[in-house]
Amino acid sequence: MHTFTHTPSSEAQAGKTQGHVINWGWRYDLMLWWHNLTVHGKWQELQYMIAGLAQFQPGESVLDVGCGTGKLALIARRLVGPTGRVHGIDPGPKQIARARSKARRTGLSINFQIGVIERMAFPDQSFDIGLSTFMMHVLPNNLKHEGLAEIARVLKPGGRLLIVDTKRPVESAERSDRPIHVGPWNSGIQDLPQLLREAGFTQIESGDIEMGEKKFPELGFVKAHLG
């Protein structure tokens, strides 16, 4: 067992990655606000649906990898209660600054750090559940392998992982009324089960994202357990 795989001399160094970095800060939230408006609030509802899929329990420790400006981490913090803890990492300094600002305004204790999926500064077996939403599709395959191995390292035995992301366009049977970004490697959530098995995950479950009559045909989820 080892403790920290990465001891950066600065936050800027901690955010260095081969993957795609979104670093828009408040502009990212503005884009999401407009996006939510155009789909009649369904994007906001999607965040709570993701939280439902994660099945957060009081007292759990949560890691949100690629946390962006912190929306899902804030929801998770409320659900794990005062005995739980939530950490969020993202390579974008403006994203993390925005997330920290939100946590201060809401009075929620969340540890947001600049960091990357392939090199996480956490000890082994630190978390009960890991999250990744709308990030895997922008990673090249080598970073997916490295990142999933890192998530497996920092999860406790029996820990859970939830990934929500886009499908490859050719496998989306229909289009909804809004665009979803697709990664430059033409990858999708359909590719992840095999990578998860290689990283040591079991009990892998996948499915579509649906909320009542509203469907998100471009999106899917994968849930897995460690060991």
Image (cartoon, helix red, strand yellow):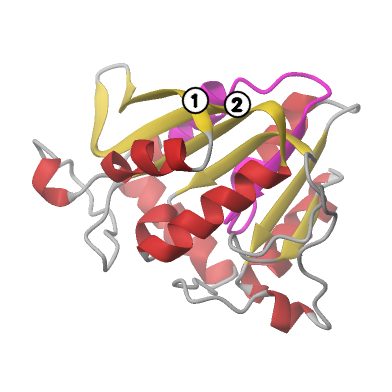
Find the residue positioned furthest to the right: 83
Mark 2 vs 1: CB contact within 8 A: yes
Image mark for residue 180: none
**Front one among 186 and 113:** 186
Q: Where is residue 209 in the image (x, y as percent from the top left)?
A: 33, 29
Q: Mark 2 points at which residue?
A: 227
Q: Position of residue 129 (x, y in %)?
A: 66, 33
* Position of 107 relative to 180 (above/below): above
Q: In which quarter of the image is residue 96?
A: bottom right
Is 186 positioned to the left or the right of 21 in the image? Answer: left
Mark 1 is on which residue type? Thr
- Circle 1 packing at 10 Å, graded few (<14), some (14-19), many (20+), is some
Residue drawn at 36 percent across, 36 percent down: 193
* Position of 150 relative to 108 (above/below): below
Q: Position of residue 22 (x, y in %)?
A: 49, 71
Q: Quadrant of residue 226?
A: top right
**Front one among 172 and 185:** 185
Q: Is mark 1 on a helix, strand or loop?
A: strand
Mark 2 is on which residue type? Gly
Separation of marks 2 and 1 at Cα, in angstroms? 6 Å
Q: Does the magenta stretch include residue 195?
A: no
- Circle 2 packing at 10 Å, graded few (<14), some (14-19), many (20+), is some
Which residue range is magenta in the image? Answer: 44-73
**Residue 139 appears in the picture as rendered:** no
Q: Which quadrant does the C terminus fall into?
A: top right
Q: Is residue 58 magenta?
A: yes
Q: Where is residue 112 in the image (x, y as percent from the top left)?
A: 76, 57
Image mark for residue 202: 1
